[in-house]
Amino acid sequence: MSVITKLTTAKSRDKKINIYLDGKYAFSLPPNVVSQAGLRTEQELTESQVEELAAADKFRRCFNAAISYISYKPRSEYEVRQRLLQRGFDRDYLEKVIVKLKDQGLIDDVSFARFWKENRQDCSPRSQWLTGMELRRKGIDNDLITRTISDVDDNDSAYQAAVKRVRRISPVDYQLFRRRLADYLRRRGFNYDVIQQTVDKLWSERRESSLRIYKEDK
């Protein structure tokens, strides 16, 4: 048997209650858990009761760590699991937390994969291959990756990426223009044919624009 010798309110945002057993700090619990369990000083607890309360504390800590991690931006299930392992949480509690997060819709690999693809397409277009590779590194299932990136058009993505980049390339001859733009597109995973087509298209548009401006000036 153990005896609760002290209950104190922690100086934290959630005001959790620190539990002291036999004069030593044991664990912390949310106020509602303490209230529901009817915990009070000088109360005796069996070993099984202590273990149950300690388990509730470990689960809460693991869950809060996961919530904090996903609060900054969407995360895949694999990322959350790896983060919690790095923080040193036991696998038993970790898996229970993962289940709860999935049940509450707080982690969802289908939604995450869609978010990742759309974010890339809108902010930093890249090839279908590279988008899939990034999702694979996030632990996304191969079948889900295939379904998610199936509508990514490399020609369109390369053009959108190049249009943003070409504004930063000063007027130069074709060879230098091609090398700079091709290197940029290659880093985004596009193949030779897509790169060549995109470079030629942008070069032609640049020449037409320059010619139009020249005629207007005259």
Image (spheres, rainbow, N blue to C red):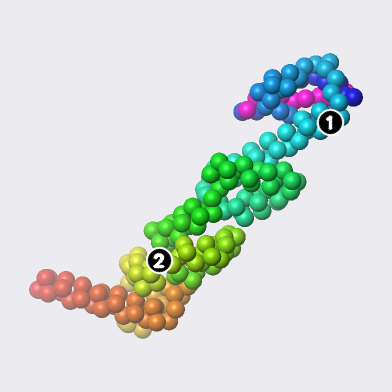
Outermost right residue:
1
Q: Amino acid at mark 2?
A: Asp
Outermost left residue:
218
Outermost bottom residue:
175
Of the pair 112 and 6, the residue shown nearer to us: 112
Quarter of the image where one finds residue 121: bottom left
User: Which label number is shown at residue 214?
Assistant: none
Q: Nearer the viewer, mark 1 or mark 2?
A: 1
Locate residue 85, reporting x and y percent: 71, 50
Q: Amino acid at mark 1?
A: Ser
Locate residue 194, reporting x and y percent: 39, 78
Locate residue 58, reporting x and y percent: 73, 37
Asked whether residue 183 is in view, the answer is: no
Is residue 26 part of the magenta span, yes or no? no
Q: Quadrant of the N terminus?
A: top right
Quarter of the image where one finds residue 122: bottom left
Q: Give the residue drawn at x 69%, y 47%.
A: 95
Q: Is residue 164 left or right of residue 3?
A: left
Q: Give the residue drawn at x 12%, y 74%.
A: 215
Q: Which residue is mark 2?
A: 151
Q: Give the residue drawn at x 78%, y 32%.
A: 52
Of the pair 143 and 6, the residue shown nearer to us: 143
Of the pair 103 and 166, the residue shown nearer to us: 103
Locate residue 24, reporting x and y percent: 85, 26
Quarter of the image where one finds residue 159: bottom left
If you read the primary sequence from the N terminus, does the residue marked by circle 1 or circle 2 appear first? 1
Q: Is residue 139 above or below residue 11?
A: below
Q: Which residue is mark 1?
A: 48
**Magenta segment boundaries in residue numbering:** 14-23
Q: Secondary structure at mark 1?
A: helix
